[in-house]
Amino acid sequence: MAQSLELLLIQFLMPDNDARRQAEEQIKRLAKDPQVVPALAQHLRTAKTPNVRQLAAVLLRKKITGHWAKLPPQLKLLVKQSLIESITMEHSPPVRKASANVVSIIAKYAVPAGEWPDLLPFLFQCSQSAQEDHREVALILFSSLTETIGNAFQPHLAGLQALLLKCLQDDTSNRVRVAALKAVGSFIEFTNDGDEAIKFRQFIPSILNVARQCLSSGDEDVAIIAFEIFDELIESPAPLLGDSVKSIVQFSLEVCSSQNLESNTRHQAIQIISWLAKYKHGSLKKYNLVIPILQVMCPLLAESADADEDDDLAPDRAAAEVIDTMALNLSKHVFPTVFEFASVSSQSANPKFREASVTALGVVSEGCLELMKDKLESVLHIVLGALRDPEQMVRGAASFALGQFAEHLQPEIVSHYGSVLPCILNALEDASDEVKEKSYYALAAFCEDMGEEILPFLDPLMGKLLAALQNSPRNLQDTCMSAIGSVATAAEQAFIPYAERVLELMKSFMVLTNDEDLRSRARATELVGIVAMTAGRARMEPILLPFMEAAISGFGLEFSELREYTHGFFSNVAEIMDDSFTQYLPHVVPLAFASCNLDDGSAVDIIESDDENINGFGGVSSDDEAHDEPRVRNISVRTGVLDEKAAATQALGLFALHTKSSYAPYLEQTLKILVRHSGYFHEDVRLQAIIALKCPTGKSKRDAWWGYGLIVAYRVFTMTGDDDKEVVAQACTSVADIIKDYGYAAIEPYMSRLVDATLVLLKEESACQQLEDDSDMDDDDTEHDEVLMDAVSDLLPAFAKSMGSHFAPIFANLFEPLMKFAKASRPLQDRTMVVACLAEVAQDMGGPIAGYVDRVMPLAIKELASSDATNRRNAAFCVGELCKNGGESTLKYYGDILRGLFPLFGEPEPDDAVRDNAAGAVARMIMAHPQAVPLNQVLPVFLKVLPLKEDHEESMAVYSCVSTLVLSSNQQILALVPELVNLFAQVVVSPVETAEVKAQVGRAFAHLISLYGHQMQPLLSNLSPAHASALGAFAPKG
């Protein structure tokens, strides 16, 4: 075989295609015999030309896996010796590398079986050789062997790390330094032990030196390996960077600022900054790196991308992603610099910088929303000015920024409708279709959260939108339909005069079938659902059928976005039709099931390594790193399928909610899908499943209990195991809702696990709270986690409401973790959350709250003076509930409480709800310990703020107190009869007070009549006839 094989190898390398093809066929035939292995090993060592030796190594690597186990020990030894000889004696670098690849494959089988004990000692010896070639190939082997026998290196890691560091610093060979860089990358990826991984921190200066040398010599592909290493270090949970983060940021900023480098290289550098902003933002703050990064990233927004450049690699887009991530995690450190950049750049003569100024403001609006709200006038001045810029690119960016503001700066942005809406209306007439499209987006986002403010603009708005809908290209029609949907949502009943015209226009869109028109059909289907919600059941039911038929027929067009929007349309129709939607269930539920059961949409392309499936022999390049197993070439996720699944999942929950028992035939399969989707890999689908799981409708009570038991069990897992905060928050909210609707019995089997999960969340130790490295963050840099922690804190009152005083031993374990959020250094909203939570727990747990009065009362009294109205309101409610339920332990605080409440009764207090809760607090104090309240001083002030203006949940406490004092003929309150008569008259005619409250006030009034008789007549005659008549109904008869 050996002689004929050598001739075939030479023939395979000939330029003659026919000769090459014949050789290939013969080699394939010979390769089926295990003897091809020693034959190839011989040619690897003895063939006269490097090309033939290299080809022998490539073929040997491809066939060794299938034949190795069949070879006798002496042949295995011969092959190994041939490979070692090739590595140490071979002069051709491509042949050495090809031989090293074969060693890696054989080692996978031979080392674990104890058949190659000399390999690692040989590699250590090579790596310290005086010969550059030996050192390089040893490092190449170390790299490739981590993939096949990485565990074998475990006992030698310390020595290996020292060796790699030495080779990184090799001052005689660039090839050795580069090979060492690649080996470091392999070992960092392989090393899981935190203590071992931390040792790689000392490598960072040397890695940076090698990367800089590679960039200066034009080896950008090698320099990118450094960024891949930094990527591994950043994503590791171990603190691998330390103060080296400064050097990494400096290097990355140098690279991304260098316009002479390749786009991919610069993108890798920007990506490192992005990962640092996401995972190590505490370190960026600690080492004062935020401003230096922004000083590079903001100008990058103004860099023009090459026409032939991949948009995903464009520096302006990548820089925007970095700024966005930093804003989300370091808002108070980001906004001042971005605002300064925007203010200066908005005046630049360069239109790219004017565009960058408004782009930067749009990008940070989500993360810096609170800071931007404080400077909204100045920010809008820049953006609205840019909307009038002579350059199209600037006007387009301004429209986009306005859309971002409308999404994230609610509700404050809506109050500026007077200046914003006219500007958007003008932009809709822009000469540029791109500006028009972004203006429709801005309009849609802005109008969505408006209410009656939109009414003065409704007619001109709809005039322009309806005209545009009929006379614009498809892409503008799509965004125009989104804008009409937002206008309809904002205008509510005022939109009805336009509904018929819009629905008529949508009919032509909902029958489009050409591929390029299906996105418009999807938007039209969505818009019909929105208009239906506004028009209501009575108007829609007679005309609904053709829209339903068109929507259902769209499922035959194989367009995921259309199916997604159609599920949303069905959801809206179910909501307005309620139980009448039952007739459509047989048609729409199977469609939702089909979408939910679609393939997950991961498109994975495999590179086959078997020589039968490779053109020729896969190419004979020494860089062909084919393995004996298939390799993943590319993974992509079809997000359209995910959106479709999320919409279908939501639809199932709404079908069940609105059709109630009629949904029973579909319940079992729906629950299976929802339970499966609650553990789905994408958070959007999980979120909709968690929401939908709250509303199953069973055939029987037993089915319902089974369903809810399953739900709670999954929620417990989700609360601590899910890595998405919004999903976890929804799980917490749903558990609280289930407790509210079904009581303690619904959660009793899971109570222990629910409490454990709540404790983990309060300690901020759940999976979704571990995504960011906050080890370097101080309390004063922490921001209130509105999405998650507000939902977590709502669980405690839910438990208390369902368990009453039995909640006490559980609360004892949750109290300290909760109080961590009440520290003075925490954000104001954290303290709001804690005080509100404690007030509600005190209300429902009752007497056991007495044990916490000395810890909670000083906090609540302090918050009475807060600058935030919500804090003052919650604090007033809290002190009242503590006094009501805290027993004698509260008496020592009465003086401080009354002094803290007094300012809330005066005119300087701007918030009626605060004043109402202050009145509620005083009422509870009087009811609990009337002797501890100086009624002669308190009652005049107390009665002066009544009746309640906004928070009528305080009505029962307040008016019960007043009535009780009157009915007991308390002398201090009887001195205020004129005020009482006036108050009672207003209460009994109030449309918002309950019959129970009015009856209580009526009894107190009747008591006054019984005490004073005709003396009351002058007071009654001062009332309006309506008030006097209403109050007179409660007077004693006879």
Image (cartoon, rainbow, N blue to C red):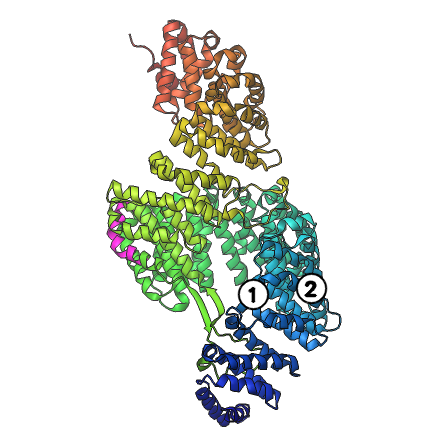
Residue 578 falls within the magenta-colored stretch: yes
Question: Which x, y percent locates residue 920?
Answer: 47, 22
Q: What type is the residue that disc 1 sits on? A: Ala
**Quarter of the rendering containing residue 54:** bottom right
Q: Nearer the viewer, residue 451 or 134?
A: 134
The percent position of residue 145, horizontal first and vertical second, equals 57, 70
The residue lying toward the viewer, choosing from 177 and 998, is 177
Residue, disc 2:
165
Left or right of 366 in this view: 749: left
Crowding near the residue tagged with mark 2, few <14, some 14–19, many ≥20 C-alpha atoms within 10 Å: many
State which tag comes first along the sequence, 2 or 1: 1
Give the residues in magenta: 577-591
Q: Looking at this rendering, what residue extends furthest in the right direction?
A: 171
- Callout 2: helix, strand or loop? helix
Is 878 placed left or right of 555 in the picture? right
From this view, report whether residue 43 is shown above or below residue 296.
Answer: below
| Residue 152, numbered circle | 1
Give the quadrant of residue 825.
top right
Percent across and percent down for residue 1005 are 38, 13
Residue 386: tell me if it is visible: no
Q: Quadrant of residue 260?
A: bottom right
Number of other residues with Cα within 10 Å of mark 1, as a class: few under 14, some 14 to 19, many 20 or more: some
Nearer to us of marks 2 and 1 is 1
As rendered, which of 584 and 238 lies closer to the eye?
Answer: 238
- In which quadrant of the rendered image does the C terminus lie? top left
Total marks drawn? 2
Name the residue rendered at 68%, 77% in the picture: 133
The amino acid at mark 2 is Leu
Q: Identify the secondary structure beneath mark 1.
A: helix
